Amino acid sequence: MRIAYFTHSLTSCWNHGNAHFLRGVLDELIARGHDARAYEPHGAWSRANLIADHGVAGLKAFEESYPRLAPQIYPEDADLEGLVADADLVIVHEWNTPDLVARLGTLRKRGPRFRLLFHDTHHRAVSAPEEMRAYDLSGYDGVLAFGEALAEVYRGWGWGRDVHVWHEAADLRRFRPPEQETGRQGLVWIGNWGDGERSDELTEFLLRPAQAAGLPLDIYGVRYPAAALEMLARHGARYRGWAPNAGAPEIFAQALATVHVPRRFYAEQLPGIPTIRVFEALACGIPLVSAPWDDAEGLFRPGTDYLIARDGAQMTACLADLAADPAMRADLAAHGLETIRQRHTCAHRVDELLALLGSPVRTTKRLQETA
């Protein structure tokens, strides 16, 4: 099968979490013998920021870790028809321009044989619905939503049976426990500051508990303004800056535990959608404690695969218990890894995608009306 995926960026994971999952899925497709290609626009914001911060050397981790992936960077005036001429499936990520989304939809309306899907892995459908409604999806065959709550939003917008839940997952070729355990110390948190929409939660569920439990805390990520860095310093946290996602397993292997602090939109308006970091952390065999999060779709076994802390005091107690009890850490890590391997790998998601494509291609009423 020939698959074309239009991403914001495959080469850069700088503030671009979808690249994590996409790399694993495309690599799995290629490993199975499919012709899977990624296209990213010239001047992509994530790639531009990565190079500005770290030079072209910042791209090396991706190139070395994913030798099978060779994304094509296309100009603004690219011949899109030529890029998808031989494709059986075209997927377009929502972090693309409305113009690109519309142009590919127009091509699909003309009748090419490829199937065209829109892939949404963000909270803008509830946080900025006017932005998402501005996308012209009239030429698309369906939507891939990374959680049931998000899929329900698209059903409310008239997509019905043409919206499909496709959760993110861990790439087990790269994300796995260390072959040889060495000394683990303290806590680690990998995440971007973003727009400060969870600054209160990070203070309550990460910074204060780590300090209260007497555990060193290392933080990796980008977009930390001066005020955020001052907040980290006040709580004794060490800010390490950007780390390539391919280096996350080694980072996790050095820490006793990690913490999940969901963004407010996922905690309140899109329940059941964990971030990619949850899948990756559990795949690496590190114990995880989460701030309040509703696993509405039953993806994991709360209390078995990871611990839940209702408030900052309980988070402090959980972290202190984990630090003092190696057996507890080992049990929690083993169960989390078990669930990932059984249900949440990129191989599982490829199986799901191929099963979806095995169903007959339906010419939707949407296409019939706009053809």
Image (cartoon, rainbow, N blue to C red):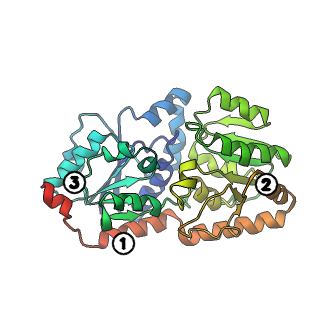
Place of residue 64 in the rendered image (x, y in percent of width and height, measured from the top left):
52, 45
Q: Earlier in the sequence, mark 1 or mark 3?
A: 3
Three-letter residue code for mark 2: Thr
Q: Marks 3 and 2, Cα distance to the nearest angstrom?
A: 53 Å
Per the image, label 3 sits on a secondary structure element best described as loop
The residue identified by callout 1 is: 355
The residue identified by callout 3 is: 139
Three-letter residue code for mark 3: Gly
> Marks 3 and 2: CB-CB under 8 Å?
no
Viewport quadrant of the C terminus: bottom left
For image coordinates 58% across by 69% down, the residue present is 341
Q: Is residue 287 left or right of residue 166?
A: right
The residue identified by callout 2 is: 182
For image coordinates 70% across by 61% down, the residue present is 308
Closer to us: mark 2 or mark 1?
Answer: 1
Circle 2 Cα neighbour tier, 10 Å, few/some/many (<14 / 14–19 / ≥20): few
Between 100 and 40, the one lying in front of the other is: 100
